[in-house]
Image (spheres, rainbow, N blue to C red):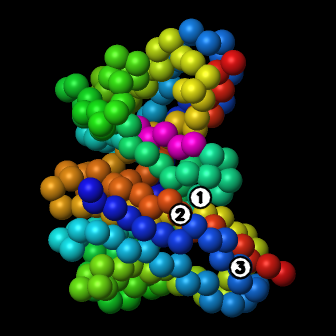
């Protein structure tokens, strides 16, 4: 399958700092990328849909000013958690859609821990 | 609200047995269905996708889709301990663009 690279895999930060997570599609172009958040023993919750060259579409209840998404190229999307707080601690996963077959491939995830 | 329902389990099966995982969805017009496997602490991995009614086989995995009854299932033959994971059902709902909605997942335990 297609490869999606996500970095960093783990982040521990102090409350109030900002954290940037990168998601790259390595062997295909992804016009659309998705950002999910997963709390322990829960399913993936879609946060936003990121389209190359345009503003992200956020799901209801997700603060766009707190979770900044940039999709600058066909292979890179970034999620910045601004002024992180302990309740933002979660597993963040990006995914990219392979346009040729509509399959969704996931990055390896980022475990964010805010102290 | 469009939903995807799964039994959270855990579903325990002995090694070598067939594991059957089920999923129901709320939107009758949905067209695309996916099964992902997720190990603890890892991101989901695509196992199967199915678009048409009936069965689709890939190695030890068979996906079954019944659009009239709005359910999709995953069968794992000759279950191995390495199959122990959480299996997520995902549906692309009509009118939802290319978003996937995930169920809560079923935890599978394959016991020696």
Task: Pick whichever, B9 or A97, lies toward us.
Answer: B9
Q: How crowded is mark 2: few (under 14 residues within 10 Å), some or many (20 or more)?
A: many
| Disc assigned to residue B84 | none
Q: Mark 3 lies on which chain?
A: B
Q: Mark 2 points at which residue?
A: B105
Chain designation of label 1? B
Give the residue pinned by disc 1. B38
Nearer the observer, A95 or A114: A114
Could you tell me which residue is drawn at 48 percent across and 27 percent down? Answer: A22
The region drawn magenta spans A35-39
Residue B96, above or below B33:
above
* In magenta stretch: residue B65: no
* Residue pictured at 44% horizontal, 34% vertical: A24
Give the Cα distance between marks 1 and 2.
Answer: 9 Å
Which quadrant of the rendered structure holds the C terminus of chain B? Answer: bottom right
- Image depth: mark 1 or mark 2 in front: 2
Quadrant where the N terminus of chain B is found in the figure: bottom left
Which residue lies under the disc numbered 3? Answer: B12
Which of the two discs, 1 and 2, labels the residue nearer the N terminus? 1
Question: Residues at marks 1 and 2, common chain?
Answer: yes
Residue A53, by quadrant, is top left
Tell me which label, 1 or 3, sits earlier in the chain.
3
């Amino acid at each position: 399958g297609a490869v999606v690279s996500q970095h960093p895999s783990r982040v521990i930060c102090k409350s109030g700092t900002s954290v940037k997570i990168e998601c790259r599609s390595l062997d295909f172009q992804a016009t659309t990328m998705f950002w999910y958040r997963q709390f322990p023993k829960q399913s993936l919750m879609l946060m936003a849909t990121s389209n190359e060259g345009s503003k992200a579409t956020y799901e209801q209840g997700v603060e766009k000013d707190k979770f900044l998404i940039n999709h600058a190229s066909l292979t890179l999307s970034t999620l910045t958690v601004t002024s992180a707080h302990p309740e933002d601690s979660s597993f963040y996963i990006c995914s990219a859609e392979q346009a040729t077959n509509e399959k969704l491939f996931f990055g390896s995830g980022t475990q964010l821990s805010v102290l | 609200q469009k939903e995807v329902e799964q039994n959270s389990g855990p579903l325990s099966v002995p090694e070598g047995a067939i594991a059957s995982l089920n999923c129901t969805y709320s939107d009758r017009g949905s067209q695309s269905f996916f099964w992902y496997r997720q190990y603890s602490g890892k991101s989901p991995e695509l196992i199967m996708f199915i678009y048409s009614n009936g069965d689709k086989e890939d190695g030890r995995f068979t996906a079954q889709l019944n659009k009239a009854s709005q359910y999709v299932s995953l069968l794992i033959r000759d279950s191995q301990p390495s199959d122990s994971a959480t299996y997520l059902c995902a549906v692309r709902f009509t009118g939802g663009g290319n978003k996937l909605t995930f169920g809560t997942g079923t935890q599978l335990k394959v016991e020696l």
